[in-house]
Amino acid sequence: MNDQNRLIRLIMELRQTGIADTRILSVIERIPRDLFVLPNFADQAYENTALPIEQGQTISQPFVVAFMTGALELGDRHRVLEVGTGSGYQAAILSKLCRRVFTVERYRSLLKVAEQRFRDLDMHNIVSRHGDGAKGWPEQAPFDRIIVTAAAEEVPKALLEQLKDDGGIMVIPVGKESQHQDIVRIRRNGDEYSEEKMLPVRFVPLVEGTATEKRNSTTHST
Ligand code: SAH
């Protein structure tokens, strides 16, 4: 099967598993996921599975990317903070559905590769930086939307503070590493935060601080 047929099959599978938003489906159709995976996994780029990337991290499963993107209720004027750039795939999807994406990654090496992908694909509304995303991006706050793509044991306070106070939405996996985690959606109105559990998932952990690079590390962490 070639990539085009695999992609069609993936889109059908996403529809069957409840992804109904045609804007999200068409963005997934347009962004070449094969450019975001390691070369030796390129043949699996259009499978509905998470795949290992460098530094023991993962590119999320397409269904989870689509689900979290939908949960954000994005508008085309929104400024969105992503914590955990990883391969850059989720940021690329978001960039087609909102005004600007601010993405933070704690591994400098992962960030460099992702930034090159954004340039190659002419995605000029993605701004990225190396740092601890648990601290958010205070200089750019507040954000209409915040998406965290690593699992937090507790929702970082800085992120709650940097969410817009008139209907801001954060989507974040919450739970301990290798234990039960759920995608949680938080809505902010003033100083009121309401939380909604949405989907059981399994993510790599949100780790505080910036990272020390591991050499030749492409092993899957979970
Ligand atoms: N959104 C990514 C998913 C990558 S996996 C994609 O589409 O490919 C989660 C990423 O979060 C990893 O790259 C990991 O290094 C990063 N991460 C974990 N804790 C972080 C933190 N505190 N700040 C920034 N990035 C973090």
Image (cartoon, grey):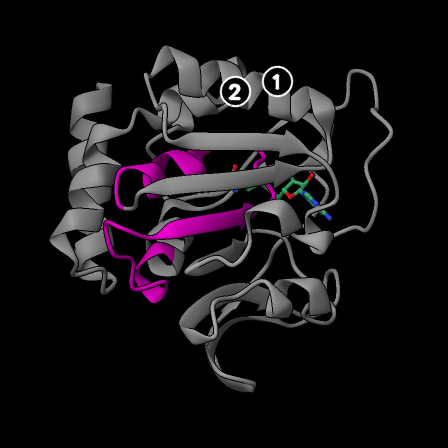
In the displayed structure, 4 sits above or below 97; it is above
Where residue 104 appears, as percent x and y from the top left, is: 62, 39
Q: For the point 25% across and 62% down, which residue is it?
A: 17
Local SS, label 2: helix
Per the rendered image, the range of residues in magenta is 69-97
Q: For the point 38% across and 40% down, which residue is it?
A: 100
125 relative to 181 in the view: left or right = left
Q: Distance between the residues labelled 1 and 2?
A: 5 Å
Q: For the point 72% across and 24% down, which residue is it?
A: 108
32 relative to 87 in the view: left or right = left
Pointers 1 and 2 in contact (C-beta within 8 Å): yes
Q: In which quarter of the image is ligand 1?
A: top right
Q: Residue 115 got which mark?
A: 2
> Is 92 contained in the magenta span?
yes
Query: In this figure, what is the number of numbered marks?
Result: 2
- Can residue 84 be seen in this snapshot? yes
